[in-house]
Image: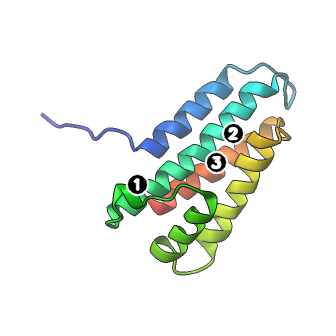
Amino acid sequence: MRVTALPREGVRYLENSRQVLRHVPFEGDIYLKRKPVREAMGTAYLAVLEAINEALRRRGVPRKELPRSVDAYRDALQRHLTRDGKLMREFESLYDLLHLAGYYDGLIYNRKIVKHAIDAAQRFIDRIA
């Protein structure tokens, strides 16, 4: 019997984010309720952080030494996961889009932009997996 691996935590968070969005009413390209969109964007950002944590653990970083702030995540990405600046630029873009604009400020409620942001998080997660 073949045993399938459990989904990675970051992927699971991202799926939770998509699940929240499926239940948000919209008219045209605009979500009508902003609170669940903010929740979904925050969950997508957490998916990115969880994926980074998983990648760091695979590279031997002890659980106690995992990052706990955005600055610590930046440092960990530079030290352990990136050879060029592209991954850092992607992380900064996701931080600005998902966390600051999407979750913290609640400025993103256009369905196309939200979809783009979630897809960008998925590409980042796949890249560091």
For the residues labelled 1 and 3, the Cα–Cα distance comes to: 19 Å
Query: Which residue, given by chain and number where applicable, does mark 2 sit on?
Result: 41
Q: Amino acid at mark 2?
A: Met
Query: Which residue, given by chain and number where applicable, does mark 3 sit on?
Result: 119
Q: Could you tell me if the residues under marks 2 and 1 are in contact, i.e. CB atoms within 8 Å?
A: no
Query: Which residue, given by chain and number where applicable, does mark 1 sit on?
Result: 54
Q: Amino acid at mark 3?
A: Asp
Residue lying at the far left of the rendered structure:
1
Q: Residues within 10 Å of mark 3 (few under 14, many from 20)?
A: some
Residue lying at the far bottom of the rendered structure:
84
For the residues labelled 2 and 1, the Cα–Cα distance comes to: 20 Å
For the residues labelled 3 and 2, the Cα–Cα distance comes to: 12 Å
Quadrant position of residue 57? bottom left
Q: Along the polypeptide, which appears first: circle 2 or circle 1?
A: 2
**Residue found at x 85% / y 22%:** 32
**Residue found at x 61% / y 38%:** 43
